[in-house]
Image: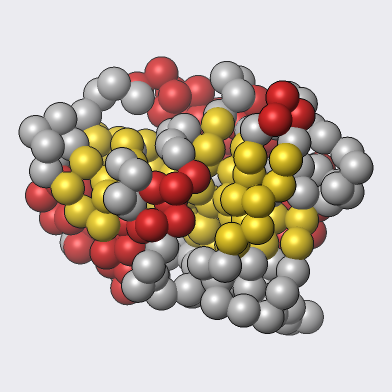
Amino acid sequence: MGSIITCSNFALKDEYIMTTVIIVIIVAVLLFILVRRNQSSTLIKIENPKIVLLQIGTDKQPQLDADLAIYADLYSAISTKTVNNIDGLNDFIGTSSFDLFHVFADVDKEGNIYDSFHNKAPISAIVNLMQSRGAKYIFFASSNPADGYISGGKGMEQKANIVMTLNRKGPGFTEFFKKIFLKVSKGQSLPTSWVEISPQNPNETHEHGPEAIATMNAGNVVLLGDK
């Protein structure tokens, strides 16, 4: 387990992870930080990690294509998957085993992932299913409102490193995580890599980086590159 980080600020406290800290950053954007502290000194290194970029429908295809660049030069076991609806999402996750789920999905204010047919599933149920399948990293890579993520966190088990994106900032998301995984793939932890790329100083802003909520409950798990 590890720490909670955003691209602009960093905070720690020993409380339930869905405790919300509101941070005012550049252009008066509010970032919500969910925090739980636990730092392990022993790194768990996963060799040949399996990574999937997963989307509901095809409207996020440009984002998926862009984000492939985060992993393509570092890892071999990368796949992509498009499902048509929530049932397809559940079926795929329930029969899969990936170390990293990189997900493109829309989230409503009540904390549900939804499809174009107006079917819904709580974020907590989807995340818990991914964790039950062994996921150590779970990234929600599409821009969604903070209150949806907060609401969806109720009942969520806290085992994985989870990133919930508020604002991709155009190419900022891809470029930010490319820099992070250059470090992670060489054996450095995700929290350490994040802080090096985005120093957590409340007086410092990161104009071009994405805005995100991140919980590092598998902060000592490293996905080693194999390229």
The answer, for residue 47, to whether it is visible in the render is no
Q: Viewed as shown, does residue 227 lie left or right of 82?
A: right
Quick check: 227 above or below 15?
above
Q: Viewed as shown, does residue 203 lie left or right of 20?
A: right
Picture quarter with the C terminus: top right
Q: Position of residue 149 (x, y in %)?
A: 43, 51
Picture quarter with the N terminus: bottom right
Residue closer to the observer: 165 or 33 = 33
Q: Quadrant of residue 70?
A: top right
Quick check: 219 above or below 121?
below
The answer, for residue 9, to whether it is visible in the render is yes
Identify which residue is drawn at 65% across, 51% down. Answer: 22
Q: Position of residue 142 (x, y in %)?
A: 44, 34
Q: Position of residue 127 (x, y in %)?
A: 35, 62
Identify which residue is drawn at 47% across, 33% down. Answer: 143
Q: Quadrant of residue 74?
A: top right
Label total for image: 0
Identify which residue is drawn at 70% across, 30% down. Answer: 28
Q: Viewed as shown, does residue 142 lie left or right of 212?
A: left
Q: Position of residue 101 (x, y in %)?
A: 41, 51
Q: Viewed as shown, does residue 110 lie left or right of 169?
A: left
Quick check: 25 above or below 98?
above
Residue closer to the observer: 153 or 187 = 153
